[in-house]
Image (spheres, rainbow, N blue to C red):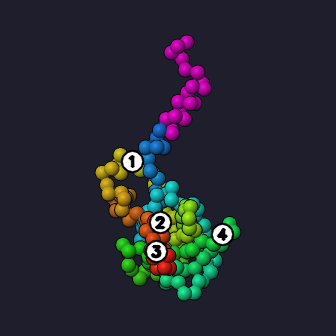
Amino acid sequence: MDSMEMPGEVAVDEQIEEQKNEKDTVSFLIFSVNEHRLAIEISLVQEIVRDYKVHFLPFVPEYIEGVINYAGKPYTIVNPCVLDEIKEDSFVEINNPTFLLFKRDDDQFGLHISMVEIFYEVLKEDLEDEDWENEITYKGRQIPLLKPDKIEERLLRDLGKI
């Protein structure tokens, strides 16, 4: 009987193996803003929402489109033209009402995007070969990695909080 495994032991071993595999990977959300692809670590995203009305705010920088009311909380919506890496006119107008809301303890803000492309899981060992602090490789292409902290710093600086 020593060589036989009990059914409960197999389930526990499988769960441990799954947890180990989960820790060895990093999940990303690849999304598009018009014709451009960007990525974000999925752990930084609180929610993806659609079809919310953006309420205009006067006297704010032009990259702040306004706020949406989500679950009774106001979320500042940023147009991706705030990204320093991408300074193209095509980013200014986004027709699709899809928003990435960031998981934050201090501020509530999100990004206006065109669409969600794919959830992409990468082995950590594969990321060690890349400069994955700034970009990831997906299907042979380098995709810039979005950093909500940098967007927040820009917001605070431009709104006079820093």
Residue 97 picture quarter: bottom right
Q: Residue at x 56, y 61 (%)?
A: 105
Residue located beneath label 3 in the image: 162
Q: Position of residue 73 (x, y in %)?
A: 65, 69
| In front: label 1 or label 4 | 4
Residue located beneath label 1 in the image: 124
Quick check: marks 2 and 4 in contact, CB under 8 Å?
A: no
Q: Secondary structure at mark 1?
A: helix
Crowd around label 4: few <14 · some 14–19 · many ≥20 (10 Å): few
Number of numbered discs visible in the structure rendering: 4
Q: Residue at x 58, y 68 (%)?
A: 108
Does label 1 or label 3 sit earlier along the sequence? 1
Residue located beneath label 2 in the image: 148
Q: Position of residue 101 (x, y in %)?
A: 56, 66
Q: Position of residue 84 (x, y in %)?
A: 38, 74
Residue located beneath label 4 in the image: 73
